[in-house]
Image (tube, grey):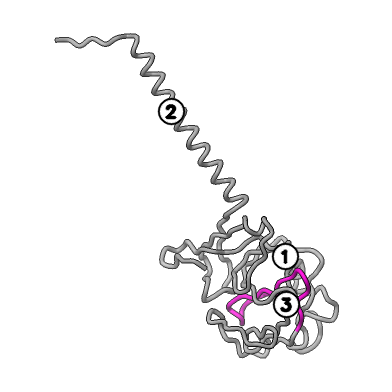
Amino acid sequence: MTGVTDGAAEPEERARAWGGLVELVVVVAAALFFALVIQAFAVKPYRIPSPSMVPTLKVGDRVLVNRFSHDLGADPQLGQIIVFHPPSGADDSTCGNPGEGPNYDGPRSERPCSRPTATHSDQTFIKRVVAGPGDTISVRDGHAIRNGHAVHEPYARTCTDPACELRQIRIPAGHWFLMGDNRGDSEDSRYWGPVPTGWIIGRAFLGYWPIGRVGTL
């Protein structure tokens, strides 16, 4: 017995097939759109380019950064790891306060930088928040002394080099003092000063690559 199909059904089947294809295209396009929006405004991946955050983050590690909360006006918290634009002084180790910083001809411990340059660099750095507005900060053996008290920093490497010593300064309003965990090998606020809130991009909250180092930060 030979089967017979209703010719009128074929256009309907083709219409359903095209409808399904169009729906798939719309879903994929929407997914790509929202992925781009999320990356642009909420979460963005970054690659670690230097050893300044060792042992917490190694060269080549990938992290996700939450940009959304900062865009809504949230300040960083002490101990958080953040991504930011450093002062333009980071390009050539220049302090925004004359007589301070690496270019001042004096002992390292006598030339901390208490004020950044007026503009930011195009570079993107990742460091840890060590002190905030109004705090006093000094460094001994690579470890922070905030408001006269040693900060508990199990993540930070001790540095006994005299270059790691830093005399006390006070952080201006609306600024944050940032340091790498690898205190003996980190260009940070000790050299070019605190960072204004407006130059902060967001908080690094998750390491996602390599697989063996996946975890929250």
Disc 3/disc 1 C-alpha distance (Å): 18 Å
Q: Dot 3, crowdedness within 10 Å: few (<14), some or many (≥20)?
A: many
Which badge, 3 or 1, is on the more N-terminal residue? Answer: 3
Q: Is residue 13 left or right of residue 82?
A: left
Residue at figure coordinates x 61%, y 81% from the top left: 183
Residue 76, given in percent of the width and then of the height, sits at 65, 67
CB atoms of marks 3 and 1 within 8 Å:
no
**Which span is picked out in magenta?**
169-192
Residue 23, given in percent of the width and then of the height, sits at 46, 30
Which numbered disc covers residue 197? 1
In this view, the mark in front (3 or 1)? 1
Amino acid type, callout 3: Tyr
Most extreme residue toward the right, as rendered?
Answer: 98
Q: Secondary structure at mark 2?
A: helix
Residue at figure coordinates x 73%, y 61% from the top left: 198
Residue at figure coordinates x 81%, y 85% from the top left: 105
Residue 99, given in percent of the width and then of the height, sits at 84, 81
Q: Dot 1, crowdedness within 10 Å: few (<14), some or many (≥20)?
A: some
Q: Is residue 178 depicted above or below 35 in this figure?
A: below
Amino acid type, callout 1: Thr
Which badge, 1 or 2, is on the more N-terminal residue? Answer: 2
Q: Secondary structure at mark 1?
A: helix
Q: Secondary structure at mark 3?
A: helix
Residue 65, given in percent of the width and then of the height, sits at 58, 60
Q: Is residue 170 magenta?
A: yes
Residue 72 falls in image quadrant:
bottom right
Find disc 2 in the rendering and name its residue: 21
